[in-house]
Amino acid sequence: MMISTPERVTQQMKRELVVILEMAKLMEKPLDAPRTIQGLLRLLSQLYGLNCGRVSLPDAPTSTLQVRYSYGLSVDDLKAGRFNLNFNEGVTGYVMRTGSIGLVPDVDKEPLFIRRITELSHHRGGRMAFIAIPILETGTPIGVLSVQREGLHERPFDNDISLLRVAAAMIGQLLRIHSFVVEQTAHLVKENQHLRHSIAVEGMLKQSLAHGILGTGQSLMDAVRSAIQVARSDAPVMLLGESGTGKEKFARMIHQQSDRREQPFICINCAAIPAELLESELFGHVKGAFTGASQNKLGKIIQADHGTLFLDEIGDMPLALQSKLLRVLQEKKVDPIGSMQSVSVDFRVITATHVNLQESVNQGNFRLDLFYRLHVVPVHLPPLRDRQDDIRQLALHFLNELNHHYERNWSLAADAFAVLEQFDWPGNIRQLQNVLERTALTNDQDLINGDQLRLSLASESAITIPQKAKALPHGSETAPATSAANNGRLNYSRSYNWVQQDEAEVIRNMLALTNNNQSEAARRLNISLRQLRYRVSKLGIERPNI
């Protein structure tokens, strides 16, 4: 029975309408771009005979057009479906570049068509057509929707193209929404990470401020973070840093952040007590143990039971006591002097030192086994010269304390901050506090200016720190030179004096040696980059001719 042309057109329109309605239903579902696009391609194949549908999108890093979504194609087909965007390659590439519709009624007769995806495995014999529709955004192609149609069909290609343009518009909408969601999700993730970081930093600042640790510099925050991270464990912590960097404050912060916060925090400075008395202070004694022992005495270790024992300047502990301390740490028992009975103890140990304990071990002044027992979690406390951004905050804090204590109203002039920031502070925070107090008490006026601080710092400038040899890896480039003639390096020990004119030649030579790399020059000169730049400016050092 022959079907008339009007009836055939009506059936065709109904068929197209069914496909469009089914595609619209897919668009109503919760957003899942990959699944929805694949569903659209499936409908085109099953309900309309437009098979092997794929959506090709540009990949900027590789400058290629790649199949991102498909239906009815194998993995090998998808790997082959790449077109170079920089060359005139294939019908798909042509459509992407021009935004035109690509129609190949018979792929066997079209030289522009490249057989990559449309292999014989998808071809049942006879004529095979290929149709490619641009996916547009404000008139610009952002991708290509392509299908293949097999055999002889009575319907015209115009009907296929019309339906595919509707599908391409839907896919374009899905891609735009998907791209927006991805961008917003990435933005929210980034904001969330930033917020979490800010909250973490704010939490660290609150915890450090609560224990009198002032500053927001990165080096200080790194030390605070390291201390807080291990606070809730019982791992021994060794605080490494110069005198006056706040090691006891860090030790108290670790104790307060630990599960032992309700128990005693016992502190003892191993360098401040004579060696003959230190043993009794640490381990205690019983009545009559030695001349003058008129009563029992609890040692610091027993006093710290269930709490924290902070051993400051552990590097100054005599070797004989190091051996006894090691036994306590291993067996968790203390033998008071003169006692025949051991006392069980449970404490967390925190140590601090300003000396190089590795060097002390090498020299036989510190036990290697004790070093490894105590050096479980090292925390490096930065010196004040590496925290110049914090000097203003510290100075204002100390001056505020002085105002409260002496009932005065001292303040710092603008040039005073520059003076404070330019000094190297060998005594670190403790020295800064003392200099401010001395300057304030000897000042008749409430405003402290830079000249008055320079006068107070004049005596401080005579202080130099002895340079101790450091244990460095064999062959290290930073190993100190015994003389400039040995290896072409300058032996420039850190100086805490004001900028001197005779430094200019040393700095010029080092800049020439490092090809004007100021960071490397500062490292070799053992000063900070900021200090080097200040000296270069102050001394009028020109860029060396390299």
Image (tube, grey):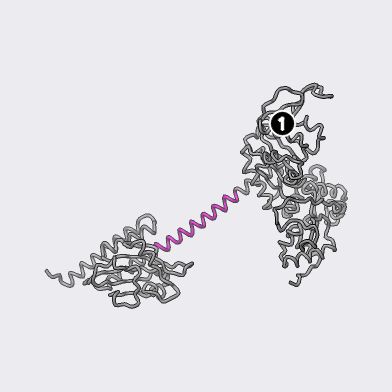
* Callout count: 1
Q: Quadrant of the N terminus?
A: bottom left
Is residue 185 on the magenta stretch? yes
Amino acid on which the number 1 mark rests in the picture: Ile
Stretch in magenta: 174-199
Residue 446 vs residue 387, the one in the foreground? 387
Q: Is residue 409 left or right of residue 7?
A: right
Query: In the rendered image, which residue does mark 1 sit on?
Result: 301
Q: Is residue 354 visible?
A: no
Residue 476 location, x and y as percent? 70, 56
Crowdedness near tag 1: few (<14), some (14–19) or many (≥20) residues, C-alpha within 10 Å? many
Residue 310 found in image quarter: top right
Residue sitting at 45 percent across and 74 percent down?
A: 86
Q: Could you tell me which quadrant the C terminus lies in?
A: bottom right
Q: Give the residue drawn at x 32%, y 60%.
A: 24
Q: Position of residue 419 (x, y in %)?
A: 80, 57
Q: Main secondary structure of the magenta part?
A: helix
